[in-house]
Amino acid sequence: MRDVTHPAAATRAPALGPEDAALAEELFAEIAARSPDTRGVSRPAWSAKETEILDYLTARAEAEGLVVTADALDNRVFCLPEDAGRTPYRLIGSHVDSVPVGGNYDGLAGVIAGLVCLIHQKRAGRGFARPLRVIAMRGEESAWFGPCYMASKALTGTLTPEELEAPHKGDGQPLSAHMAALGVDVAPIAEGRGLLPLDEIAEYLELHIEQGPLLVGEDRPAAVVTGIRGNLRLKEVRALGEPGHSGAVPRSYRRDPVMASAKLLARLDDLWAREVSEGGDLVITSGMMSTDPQHHAMARIPDSLTFSFEIRSQHPETLARVEAALQDEIARLTEETGVTFELPRPIRNAPAKVDAALHEALLAAMERAGQAPYAMASGGGHDAAIFANAGVPTGMVFVRSRGGSHNPDESMEVADLLAGAEILLAHVTTEGA
Ligand SMILES: [Zn+2]
């Protein structure tokens, strides 16, 4: 046993048990059954399917005696009856949408963890140290319209007019039309008016599956998050050269966009290795890369290549430095090889800092919940990043999940979810935390 050093550690945190596990299993199973696809689940952002899931959660929570309200986006907000209308409040939230043919846990795990905390306390006839609300949000996934975190951006007044008019990947209708079809008044969103009074929110807390291999590798069920990586994304970089016969054109005569792009990425990979060896936080990915199979062939030098380029870091200065390095290397390669590069307008999502005091409080809560404190960075972005960047003190908890995320192989064990939920519960039930 560890020595108990934290003063609040004298109060043993409430433990979640078999009844809570059964409740979580039931909610996951019922929602998976309502959103099946060929494999896994599909819960489209800003759809009637989302409404069906939210209606189910509303009915289930009301049956437990919770108070449920719909906000201006028809997200659902849950609380104990005695906490209704009380401010300031703590907010636990995440999203109910999924990617197409996705897994059942990305997003939904956070909503269910919050509901388990509420229902556990309600059944036990106990409350929270401060008023607590749980929010089940709509559209977070970028797979449907392009922009991500749409609900939390609209709530905080940071959804841009461009994002509001982003066309749906299936029917081409703009996000605003899909929102309006759900009865949402889009006028205040278009004007950038936040839909939620942020000064009433004392803290925003989000539990999410990890999406990476670290907790599995470390053999830990849960972690407290240190910070959320921001990103810079170039969806379609075009490298332009000169076509030619693969056997007939000597090296010095070539302007080969494939070779030039390979050099570009190799140089940025070297920069990445240096950054990491010096203790920096950076990841670089080129997830899509192709010549045109209609026009290009094995025995031809292609005239063009397109590729995606994404960098992520917890530090804005690192993102800026790598972006500058990309520009420098492009200029140098154009000089060296004659290949030119066309860059699209970058999509930027700023890194988010978790609140330092809240981070410490969550680590202490983890200890009170009987778990050795453990912290790690978040590689993925989440609604939490939007609340943090809007100035709300924000904290996150990760839960171990195998199979990554955004695919039907996502697999999280309910026992691990409860370990994560116990960290939240230990935090929100401790006076003075
Ligand atoms: Zn998510």
Image: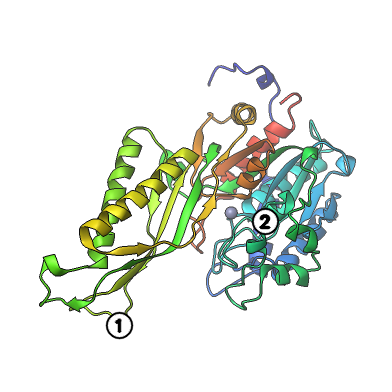
Relative to residue 98, is residue 404 drawn left or right?
Answer: left
Identify the disc placed on residue 96: none
Q: How many numbered markers are drawn?
A: 2
Amino acid at pointer 2: Leu
How far is mark 1 from mark 2, CA to CA? 39 Å
Relative to residue 53, is residue 377 drawn left or right?
Answer: left
User: Where is residue 284 shown, x and y percent of the image?
Assistant: 38, 50
On screen, 91 above or below 37? above
Residue displayed at 71% across by 68% down: 176
Q: Quadrant of ligand 1?
A: bottom right
User: Where is residue 335 shown, x and y percent of the image?
Assistant: 24, 57
Residue picked out by circle 1: 295
Relative to residue 294, is residue 9 drawn left or right?
Answer: right
Location of residue 289 by image quarter: bottom left
Location of residue 259 by image quarter: bottom left
- Of 134 and 383, which appears nearest the observer? 383
Dot 1: what SS? loop
On screen, 284 above or below 393? below
* Residue 22 seen: no
Screen quadrant of the C terminus: top right
Residue displayed at 68% across by 35% down: 393
- Of 59 and 280, which appears nearest the observer? 280
Amino acid at pointer 1: His
Residue picked out by circle 2: 159
Identify the image's colour scheme: rainbow, by chain, secondary structure or one colour.
rainbow
